[in-house]
Every structure is written in C-alpha cells, then in structure tokens.
Image: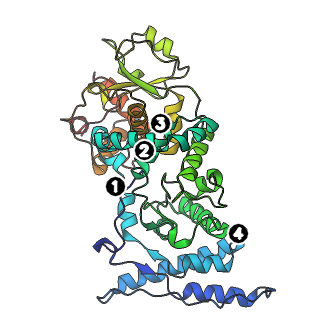
Amino acid sequence: MKRTPTPLHSPAHRHRWHAPTLLAISLTLSACTSTPPVETKPEAPSAVISRPAAVESSEEVDHGQKFARWIADFSTSARAAGISDATLHSAFDNVRFLPRVIELDRTQPEFTRSVWDYLDTAVSAQRVTRGLEKLQQLRPQVAPIAARYGVPTEVLIAIWGIESNYGTHVGDMPAIDALATLGFEGRREAWARDQLLIALKILQNGDIAREQMVGSWAGAMGQTQFIPSVFLAYAVDADGDGKRDIWGSVPDVMASTANFVAHSGWQTGQAWGLEVRLPTGFDYARADPTVRQSADAWAGAGVKAMDGTPLPALADSSILLPAGARGPAFLVGPNFRTILRYNNATSYALAVSLLAQRLANGPAVQAPWPRDLRALTRDQVLALQAALNKQGFDSGTPDGIMGPATQRGVRQYQRSVGLPADGYATADLLQRLQ
C-alpha cells in the first residue's frame, strides 16, 4: 500500500534520537571477547549523537538512551544470527528514532477513511490515465513477465500504481530506522524485530546500500512496497545485473511483484470478481467473507452482473458490501483474496482490482456510494467494540479496527434489533448501541 511519508527535513522530524556510543561500545567489547579474525577489521567508530538546536529535555535524553540500549541488545541477537559487525556498523551507527513512524502507525488510511474516499484517490481518473500510458509504454517488458508468472499485466501495473504511483513515490524513510522505531516502541515489537533482522540480511547480501534502502513508515520498500521478509523470499533479479533492485529496475519490480502474487495463490485466467446487482429481499447477513459458493449458486439466488451478462466462473466466491446495504455490491473470488494477502485491507484489494479492471478497458463502479455517511474514527470503533461486548455481541478484544470479529458482532446486533445485517457500522448505529 502507498503511504505518503513525511520528508525527513520536516518539523515532524525535529526530535529524532540517534543511537549514542553505546552501540559502538557493544561492538567493540564483542570484538575483544571473540576469536580474532584472520583479516583485520576496521575499528568500531562511535555513533554520531544528533542534538536539535534547542536544549533537549531530560525526557528526550532518557528516551534516546533507552533507544540506544534497545539497539545494542538487538545487535547482540543479530550478531548471533549471523549478521557481521560491518553490517551492524553500517546499519546502526547513525540509526534514528522517528516519532513520525509511530504517528502514522495509528492513522493508516484504509482504516480511518471511508472506502469511497480512499477509492476516489486510489482509482482517480488521473491514475487510470497514467496507468494506461504506462501499460502501453511498458507492455513489451511486462507482458513476458506476466506470462511467465500467470499474473495479468494490468494487475501488476495496478499494484505498482497503488503502491507508488507508478514508481514516483517510493517513500523516503530509511527502512532500518523505521523498523527499529517500531521495534523499540513495542506495540509490534516481535514483528518489527523479525523484519529488521531480515533487512540486515538484505544489506549483508549486497542487494542495496543502507542509504538507498528507503520506503514507507512501516519498512515497506521499493516501487511495490515489499516488507523485508517478502523481499528476501520473492524478489527477483530479472534484468540480470546481479542485484534484486525493486527501487530502480522496472523489470525487477514487475518480476518480483508477479512472483509474490503468484505464490500467494493467484489463479491464472480467473477474474477477481465484478460489481453485481443483488435481488430484492436479499439476506444481507450472507454478505460475509465466510459464506462462499459458486457463481452459479449466487446466480441461482438472483445475483446478476450489472450489464446482465453471465457471472464469471468462480467456484469459491462471496458477496462483498464495502459500504453496507446502501452501497455497491461485488462478487469476489479467490484472486481478490490473493490481493488481500498483499495488503489485508478490503479497500486496498478493491482499489487494485478496480484499477486493473479500468486498465483492461473495464467499467468503473456504477452503483452510487452512500457519501452522506461518515467513517467511524478509531476511537469510535473502540467505543463500538466495547458496547458490543458489553451487550453480549462478541467483537473480540477492542483495538479500534473494523475487522471480521467486529463485523460479526455488528451483524448479530443488527439482526437482534431488526436492521439489515450487513455488518456495516455507522455513527447512528454506535449511538443506538450506547
């Protein structure tokens, strides 16, 4: 997913902490207690300590020291996992804590914007036009890659367009700094530690230099925003230069993306789905990702394509109502769920699918969105989850995210009070619950 980073010179980055000399001390002590190497290694340099123009508060100094200790502790475990001192120096001598990363971690647009607001930007007329230009320009390069991996050219271009606006916005946050920040902050420490260790392995392998390993606030990198573990497993050197360069090589970007999508379960020759018209009296509780059946079965229940043509052959499909009973309806199959494995947000998967459809000269969404409704804020979702749980409609542990458990709880509540059980939460529903 494309996330707009804040430039490193902006006010949001004034208070960043470098890891102080504790890391250099840790490395030096390790060198003194280990078996001397055959070749002489460079002396461990001291890390630079960044000081803002204003005097740092004692709280900021304490925070910086804690971050440095976390880096030193992580370095010990990374060394035990086979990361060299040279790589650790390259990665951590000037590592910084980035407060902006923590801010962005709590305001991901797929979770705090209505789906139509997100799609207005993600699948804008300008992005469609630009995508068609790129499709024509790069088809000779991309078509053989698409054929090799069985993933349509339009899908690869669409992912590229959503993730980085066709390579123009890859992000400028150092991946090492971003992952170290997330690991230190602690909310996703285990995940961030794993990804940080893999990022160090990528540096050690020589695919990219530390200063060029940039991306989004969450450590996703390159033109199609691979997290380090995905890069390590699926990145491809398609141009034959000896490096897997998803930052600067379009062939590497497309082949790596196609390889990942193919291994995530893409079914060659099958549609992602399509917009549909539901029959009068449709039971909205059946618009649930766990309710799956063939497209023929849905057709037998009265579900029709918007243009009246037969539904595509989908053996395992479900009805998606991203804006509830008042919004457009979609029939989605296994390939839609494959895109969710790239980014587990319904709005993201829908954006990629609809953009690919437009690039293949398909239609835009035809049914109107309920634009009078407002997306719930994270605090409102937390309140909704607490209210559902209190009244016996299990929505799981409150986390402020409208996931499957919360949607099930909403459906159960809606059914209990005679509302369409579409699982879509609104401010009116929250007020009624409270």
**Pointer 3 or 2: first along the chain:** 2
- Taking the spot 32% from the left edge, 24% from the top edge, the residue there is 416
**Pointer 2 or 4: first along the chain:** 4
**Pointer 3 or 1: first along the chain:** 1
Give the CA distance from mark 4 to mark 1.
Answer: 33 Å
Residue 215 point in image, percent of width and height:
46, 61
Give the mark toward the camera: 3 or 2.
2
How busy is the neighbourhood of tag 2: few (under 14 within 10 Å), some, or many (20 plus)? Answer: some
Residue type, mark 1 in image: Thr
Whether the residues at callouts 2 and 4 have beta carbons within 8 Å, the answer is no
Q: Which mark is residue 154?
A: 3
Q: Secondary structure at mark 2?
A: helix
Label 4 belongs to which residue? Answer: 81
**Pointer 4 or 1: first along the chain:** 4
Give the mark toward the camera: 2 or 4.
2
Asked whether residue 394 appears in the rendered view, the answer is no
Label 2 belongs to which residue? Answer: 134
